[in-house]
Image: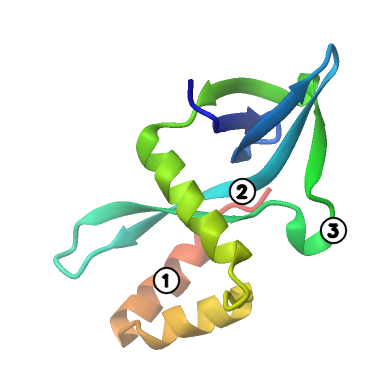
Amino acid sequence: MNKYSVLKLSNGEDIVCRIVEISKEKIKIEDPMLMDIQQIKSENGKIKESLGLVRWLKPFTEEDEYFIEKTSIVITVPASSGLSEYYEHILERKDNPLFKEVSSEEIIEDDLDQLTDDELIELVEDAKNRTIH
């Protein structure tokens, strides 16, 4: 049995976590990480998907365990072995005292510095056409 699970929440978020306890109305989870899938255009023009795991609620709380209402969960499935290994890798980095939290602003600045002018223009044009709910 896999010790990690992927939860699809009713708000559209996908998280990977350890399910610690299940009651009639709630589940108790530890170390939840939000699955952030991004489409990236490679140098040869092909689109590829990249999976990132980011802390789910940890930046906003010091809690290590969370209770989620079962009515907020659409589906729960065991994490694949590849996702489990990646999740463990991220958790090990997180627990390492040398691991530095990087703010999303720093990540964005670093990413933007690596883009060409054409890629920046394409990114701005794409952002203009997005619908934000």
Mark 1–mark 3 contact, CB under 8 Å?
no
The disc label shown at residue 61, or none: 3
The disc label shown at residue 123, or none: 1
Q: How far is mark 1 from mark 3, CA to CA?
A: 33 Å
Give the image quarter of residue 50.
bottom left
Front-most of 84 and 25? 84
Front-most of 118 and 68? 68
Label 2 crowd (10 A; few <14 / some 14-19 / many >=20):
many
Q: Residue at x 60, y 76 (%)?
A: 102
Label 3 crowd (10 A; few <14 / some 14-19 / many >=20):
few
Mark 3 is on which residue type? Thr
Give the image quarter of residue 3.
top right
Q: Earlier in the sequence, mark 3 or mark 2?
A: 2
Q: Above or below — where is 16 with respect to 125? A: above
Residue 69, given in percent of the width and then of the height, sits at 82, 25
Mark 2–mark 1 contact, CB under 8 Å?
no
Residue placed furthest toward the left: 44
Q: Residue at x 68, y 48 (%)?
A: 133
Residue 111, given in percent of the width and then of the height, sits at 43, 79
Mark 3–mark 2 contact, CB under 8 Å?
no
Give the image quarter of residue 118.
bottom left
Q: Earlier in the sequence, mark 2 or mark 1?
A: 2
Mark 2 is on which residue type? Met
**Which residue corresponds to mark 2?**
33
The disc label shown at residue 37, or none: none
